[in-house]
Structures are given as C-alpha cells and as structure tokens.
Image (spheres, grey):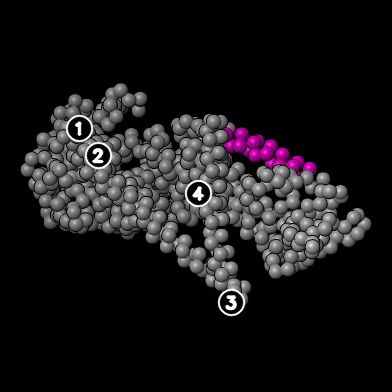
C-alpha cells in the first residue's frame, strides 16, 4: 500500500519546504519563500527543540509571533495586521483626549471605534507596503523563539500600562473640560463602557471589511482563469467599488434620509399641546390667512408662545402693545415663494409694516425659532414690534444640510427679498427699522441675503446671529478680514465700526484682548459665537489643516491642552456636535441670555451717543439691572416652568 500523501503545511508553521522540522543548530535555515505570493514577506525565526513555528510578516500578518505572545486561541481572534493593531491602539488613545466638549459614553464609543478602524486600515496598508519592500530586498531575520515570546509579551504589558496611564491622564484633562462648559464629566464606568462599545464597533467594521475582501478574492479568483493576475486584481477592485458606492449612497444613505423625512413629517403634523392664539396680531388666529391646522409643530409653538401686552407691562412697568408674530408653514407644493407671499399677506393684515421694528427671522431645519431672541426683543420694544418667519423644511438641521444643502440659504434669500419689497414700497419715513436674526442653520440661511459687510450695512438696520455654521460665506469672509492680532474666535472687523463678534456680551464693548472698541455706529450687527460651539468650528478642512481658532488658543471655555491631530480632530469635533445643545447657557450651542444684551446694543438702548439710530423710538433709560433680571426670569419661567433648575 502506498504511503498516505503528506498534507501541505503553511510556510508560517513549517520548517523545510517538505514539512520536516527545521535544520538543527549550525545548519543554514532553508528559504521558505512561497512562490507566487507577491507582497508577502516571510521572517524566519530559528528555534531549538520542538517549538519550531517560525514565520511572520513585517506588514503585520505575524502568525508565529502572535501565537507565541498571545497563544494560538487569542491570536486567532485578533485581526491579522500587527502594524494596523499598533496604530489602532494609538488612535484609541488619541480619541479620548480633550475636545471642545465632554461626550456621553456612547458618542465617545462612536468616535473611538471609527478612529480605531481608520488607524487599523492605515497600519495595514503601511505594513503591507513595508512587507513588499522587504520581500523585494530579500531580507531574512532569525531569532530565538523564547526571546520572541517574552519580548512580545513584555511589549504587550508595556503597551497596556501606557494605555492605562494615558487614559487616566485624559480622564483628568476631561474633568477640566467638563468644568469649563458646565457638563458632567465621563466617569470611570463611562470610560469602560465607551471602550467596550468602541471595540464592538471596531469588530463590526472589521467584519464588514473582511466580507468585502472575501467578495474581492472570489471575483478575482474567477477572473484570473482567463486574464493576467494584475488585470483580475484591478477588475475585482473596480467591481467591489462599484457595488459599495451605490449601496452606501443610494441605499443606505438614501434610506436614512427617507426615514428622517418621514419622522420629520410626523413631527410636523404632531400636536405640540398648544392652542390657537386669540390675538389677531398672530398667524393662525381667527381671520388669519394661515390655517391653524396646517401651521406645523414649531409654527404653532411660535405663534402661541411669547409674552402678551400685559405680561410685558408686568415686567417692565411700562405700557405695552400686543407683539405681532407671523409665521407661514411649508406649503404642500414646497414652493418657498408661496410661503413668502403668505408672510406678506399676513403683514398687511396685522399692520406689521406700521410697527417701528420689523424682524425677519430664519428658522432652523425643523422650523424652530429661538424664543430667547424673539421674546427679548418684544420686552425691549414694549411689544411694539413684528417678527416674521416661514418654514422651509421639517427635518433636523443636519439632515436638511446634508440632503437639501442650499434650502436654508434659498429660503433666507426669498423671505428677505419678498419682505423688503413690501417695505420699500412704502415712503422712507413710513418704513420700519428692519433687522434680521437666526440661530444655527437659520443664521446661515439668513446671511445668504448678503454678499459682504458693506452689503449687509446697506440693506438692513441691524442683525443678530448666533452659532453660525462654519460654511457660511459671509461668516468666512468677515472672519478672514479680521485685524491682525485678534483671534478667530472673537475677531475685530473694521475696528468694530458696524459688525462685532462676541463670545460673551462684554465683548460688544471691549475686545477679547481688553481693548475698548470705538463708537459703534449704526447699523449694528452682532455675531454671537462660543469658543466651545462645535457647530461654529467644525468644517471638513479640520481633518487636514490646523485651524486658527485652535492654534491661537484664545477660547476661555476650551481646554488649553486641546491639540490638533491630522485626521483625528475633525472626527473629535464632529463627535461633539450631538452634545452641543446639552450645555448650559453661554457654552456650546446654547445661546439664551446673551440675546438680551445683544438686542439692547443693536437697538441702541445702551445709552450710546452714536447718531442716526434707525429705531426712532429708542429709549433705554428704563432698563436697569433689576429689569434685566426680571426679564430673564420671566422668559425662563415661560419656556421651562417656574420649577425648573435655576437659569
């Protein structure tokens, strides 16, 4: 009977090509290079006795060293690229370093998991490239297996100790970040939960990657029968990419967007728990051209909320008028011009053009407006004002930004042009002072009506914008025009003559460097922006270029040790966005009490001697510290209830 055939043995686990043990000491170790495996470098570890496993790959596909260090079972569970694992390890350490805001454990897990995956992918590519170079150079190394085993385990122990020390350091640093912005810090349990969840995310993404590799290898193996190897490799790569891109963009991304629009439509139709206003000065009331049932969730809230004339009198002690609030919901045909025309019809019906102050407010993606801004204005003008707005979408701002990038800008431009056409149709002496305002995506949409600072000053009598997203062309232009020596977080433009940026209301008079600004001329415009607001500071450029705001380290509520890391900081600040609205007032993306001081300044109620105030009825002599306090309390209680925590 012929002997049974010998099973082929992997070069990584073999000694000689025929599967026999390696040569005894003193004999040359034969070459084990496997023909045809281009790009794979085999390192040979000469051993004594029975422990003869020997081959590793410098690119990270290190079978023998991994088994020696971790054991065969654990080594089988770890991804194959050692270089990738090392870089993924450092990516995790970087991911827990301070950012603009402390994150909840689940958002920290997302940031860490994505960075670990990106780090592994980078390491795998670098390792494979190095392996190919070493193979072409025919480099061979040898070492005693016991040395390899214990040095590897010592390296793992050292890496673990380094990781623990750096995570503890990051924990202490993040305590300061939490204190600076008033958010609770992530505790030890949170870090453990975030780390475990990050590993799960990493494993899932690696599993997805290996699935794509299996598909690629299958396609390449089938094609290789008919064409040269390089042609099969290229063809398989093109096919996989052609499958992934449509699947991710047309199926997954589109599916998420369609779900969010379905969710937004349901929210827009939902009952906000408010009643139709009784005052004819508000849209949705009896006689209004806007049907209450079709006004949308946030439209109903806007026209129902806010102080009435007697509320204003109770706080200020002055005679007040009923504020005008006009809001046009998104038409069924989604035509923005139709909504803007409805706004003008409501303006004529309510007499909005006869009020001394007219504010054009642009909403966020859901149709929401910041009550702190509108109510502050209504108190300060004794209710003798009108605020007009319209809905252009019903989904969260990030969804509207991704799916309908220009929708907010288009809406801001159309609303402004349509309202101003009605204003300019009146004699100059009979026109109201016109101001514009918006928060977040609403600020960017509102700014679309202006090309530069000169255009802004020529078209309106003032503006207040808060939390402007980084992509706004007007914001970008003005920021680049700042005086040398003033930081990006609080730039000074044209000596603050008309336009001023402020992290805090105090910077409306004194810049961030302590220099008193000269007389503030009319018209006056304000950009409110917190140094810790990721909505303002995130941009795609953050992945590849260090921004001025981080290099200058001028933000009072930003950790002084926050550093820019290529490819990392962009994802970190992106991970700050979901928690930016959970910060206390005057931090992150929350702008509340600042609006009182901003409107006092823009309306000219601050007692300044600047001439030609467009608000002809301006008189701030009655505004005392106690009135400010009462105003703040009344707005807070109306929005959150008297039993809410202190403001």
Q: Does 418 appear in magenta?
A: no
Badge 1 marks a residue whose secondary structure is loop
The reply to whether the C-beta atoms of the residues labelled 2 and 3 are less than 8 Å apart is no
**Left or right: where does residue 510 sit relative to residue 73?**
left
Mark drawn on residue 323: none
How many neighbours does mark 1 have within 10 angstroms: few (below 14), some (14-19), or many (20 or more)? many
Q: What residue does disc 1 label?
A: 307
User: Which tag, 1 or 3, sits closer to the chain's start?
Assistant: 3
Mark 4 near mark 2, Cβ–Cβ under 8 Å? Answer: no
Disc 3: which residue: 227
Note whether 402 is above or below 273 in the view shown: below
Counting residues from the N terminus, which is met first, the one under dot 1 or under dot 2? 1
Residue in front for this viewpoint, 394 or 597:
394
Residue at numbered disc 4: 571
Which contiguous range is marked in magenta?
A: 150-171
**Quadrant of the image occupied by residue 314:** top left
């Amino acid at each position: 009977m012929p002997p049974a055939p010998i099973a082929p043995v992997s070069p990584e686990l073999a000694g000689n090509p025929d599967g026999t043990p390696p040569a005894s000491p003193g004999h040359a170790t034969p070459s084990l290079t496997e023909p045809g495996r281009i790009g794979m470098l085999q390192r040979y570890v000469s051993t004594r006795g029975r422990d003869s496993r020997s081959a590793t790959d410098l690119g990270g596909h290190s079978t023998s060293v991994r088994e020696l260090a971790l054991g065969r079972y654990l080594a089988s569970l770890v991804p194959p690229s050692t270089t990738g694992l090392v870089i993924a390890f450092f990516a995790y350490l970087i991911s827990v370093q301070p950012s603009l805001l402390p994150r909840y454990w689940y958002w920290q897990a997302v940031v860490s998991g994505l960075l670990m995956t990106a780090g592994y992918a980078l390491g795998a590519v670098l390792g494979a490239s190095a392996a190919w170079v070493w193979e072409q150079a025919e480099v061979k190394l040898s070492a005693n297996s016991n040395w390899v085993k214990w040095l590897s385990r010592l390296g793992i122990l050292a890496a673990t100790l380094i990781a623990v020390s750096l995570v503890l350091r990051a924990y202490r640093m993040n305590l300061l970040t939490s204190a600076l912005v008033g958010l609770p810090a992530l505790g030890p349990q949170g870090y453990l939960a975030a780390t475990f969840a990050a590993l799960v995310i990493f494993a899932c993404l690696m599993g997805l990657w290996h699935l794509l590799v299996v598909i690629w290898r299958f396609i390449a193996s089938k094609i290789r029968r008919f064409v040269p190897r390089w042609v099969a490799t290229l063809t398989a790569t093109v096919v996989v990419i052609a499958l992934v891109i449509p699947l991710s963009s047309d199926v997954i991304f589109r599916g998420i967007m369609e779900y969010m629009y379905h969710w937004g439509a349901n929210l827009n139709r939902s009952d906000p728990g408010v009643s139709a206003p009784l005052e004819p000065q508000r849209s949705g009331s009896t006689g209004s051209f806007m049907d209450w049932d079709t006004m949308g969730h946030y439209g109903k809230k806007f026209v129902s909320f806010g102080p009435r004339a007697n509320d204003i009198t109770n706080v200020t002690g002055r005679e007040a008028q009923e504020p005008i609030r006009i809001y046009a919901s998104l038409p069924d045909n989604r035509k923005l011009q139709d909504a803007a025309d409805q706004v003008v019809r409501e303006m004529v019906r309510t007499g909005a053009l006869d009020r001394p102050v007219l504010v054009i407010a642009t909403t966020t993606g859901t149709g929401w407006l910041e009550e702190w801004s509108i109510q502050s204005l209504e108190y300060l003008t004794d209710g003798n004002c009108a605020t007009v707005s319209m809905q252009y979408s019903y989904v969260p701002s990030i969804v509207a930004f991704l799916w309908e990038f220009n929708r907010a800008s288009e809406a801001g431009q159309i609303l402004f042009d349509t309202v101003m056409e009605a204003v300019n149709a009146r004699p100059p002496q009979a026109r109201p002072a016109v101001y514009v305002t918006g928060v977040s995506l609403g600020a960017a949409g509102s700014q679309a009506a202006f090309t530069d600072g000169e255009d802004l000053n020529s078209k309106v009598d003032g503006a207040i914008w808060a939390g402007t997203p980084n992509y706004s062309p007007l914001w970008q232009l003005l920021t680049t025009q700042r005086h040398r020596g003033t930081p990006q977080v609080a730039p000074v433009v044209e000596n603050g003559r008309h336009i001023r940026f402020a992290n805090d209301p105090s910077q409306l008079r004194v810049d961030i460097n302590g220099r008193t600004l000269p007389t503030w001329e009319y018209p006056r415009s304000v950009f409110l922006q917190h140094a810790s607001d990721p909505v303002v500071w995130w941009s795609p450029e953050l992945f590849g270029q260090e921004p001025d705001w981080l290099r200058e380290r001028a933000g009072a509520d930003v950790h002084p040790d926050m550093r820019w890391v290529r490819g990392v900081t962009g994802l970190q600040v992106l991970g700050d966005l979901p928690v930016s609205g959970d910060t206390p007032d005057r931090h992150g993306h929350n702008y509340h009490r600042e609006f009182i001081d901003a409107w006092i300044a823009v309306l000219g109620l601050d007692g300044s001697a600047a001439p030609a105030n467009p608000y002809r009825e301006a008189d701030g002599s009655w505004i005392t510290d106690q009135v400010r306090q009462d105003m703040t309390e009344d707005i807070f209680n109306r929005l959150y209830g008297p039993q809410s925590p202190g403001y």
